[in-house]
């Protein structure tokens, strides 16, 4: 039994690990924290493996656990304290991460900022569909909502991001 459980975990990690790290990164914007959240995801999956009823795919089950981990992390006191410290550092003129500041592309920064402004219910759908590359059905299963609701939220999220980009002066088709 333990060998089967270990093999199933190893397969889940191999098949979904990279996708989960990218998904978590879109939420927390830090690769190290994203990797920690994915590790927590796999630990929870391993612990609850017997309870998994296979009503959905392992992939959608893992994505749901990862999203819940990200939401918990973002709501945590530790994360909020870190945000205050980073904001204070920026106000004082200190660059928190100069490497990222140099590497950041202006249009990417605008897009990320526009996505970050979205309410969670729209951000979840957008990230799962476009960045995690889940199908509409998989997003529906992951978020436990009807497929038409996913479509509506995806359309609204795209519209909100587009409006935010226009407000910020992003020009479609330009290299900036």
Image (cartoon, helix red, strand yellow):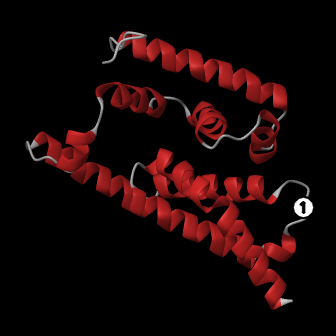
- Give x and y (percent) for residue 120: 57, 37
- Give x and y (percent) for residue 124: 62, 39
Residue at 30%, 31% in the rendered image = 105
Q: Is residue 159 left or right of residue 165?
A: right
- Give the farthest residue toward the bottom: 2
Q: Is residue 119 left or right of residue 171?
A: right
- State the residue in front, 76 or 164: 164
Residue at 85%, 71% in the rendered image = 51
Residue at 72%, 67% in the rendered image = 12
Residue count near mark 1 (Cα–Cα under 10 Å), binned few <14, some 14–19, many ≥20 = few
Instruction: Check the image and report above or below for 4 versus 118.
Output: below
- Give x and y (percent) for residue 151: 75, 24
Q: Is residue 54 left or right of residue 6?
A: right
- State the residue in front, 10 or 84: 10
Per the image, label 1 sits on a secondary structure element best described as loop
Picture quarter with the N terminus: bottom right
Picture quarter with the C terminus: top left
Q: In the rendered image, is residue 77 in sight?
A: no
- State the residue in front, 5 or 69: 5
Instruction: Check the image and report above or below for 111 versus 7.
Output: above
- Give the farthest residue toward the left: 93
Q: In the rendered image, which quarter is residue 102 located in? A: top left
Instruction: Check the image and report above or below for 83 versus 47.
Output: above
Q: Which residue position holds label 1?
A: 54
Q: How many marks?
A: 1
Q: In the rendered image, which quarter is residue 148 located in? A: top right
């Amino acid at each position: 039994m333990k060998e089967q459980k270990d093999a199933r975990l190893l397969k889940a990690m191999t098949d979904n690990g990279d996708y989960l790290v990218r998904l978590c990164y879109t939420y927390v914007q830090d690769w190290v924290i994203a990797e920690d959240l994915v590790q927590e995801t796999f630990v929870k999956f391993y612990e609850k493996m017997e309870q998994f009823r296979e009503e959905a795919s392992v992939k959608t089950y893992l994505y749901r656990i990862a999203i819940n981990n990200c939401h918990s992390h973002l709501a945590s006191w530790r994360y909020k304290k870190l945000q205050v410290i980073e904001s204070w550092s920026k106000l004082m003129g200190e660059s928190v991460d100069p490497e990222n500041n140099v590497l950041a592309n202006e249009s990417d920064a605008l897009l990320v900022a526009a996505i970050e402004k979205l309410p969670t219910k729209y951000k979840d759908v957008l990230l799962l569909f476009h960045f995690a590359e889940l199908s509409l059905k998989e997003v529906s299963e992951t978020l436990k909502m009807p497929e038409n609701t996913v479509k509506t939220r995806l359309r609204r999220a795209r519209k909100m991001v587009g409006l935010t980009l226009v407000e910020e002066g992003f020009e479609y088709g330009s290299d900036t």
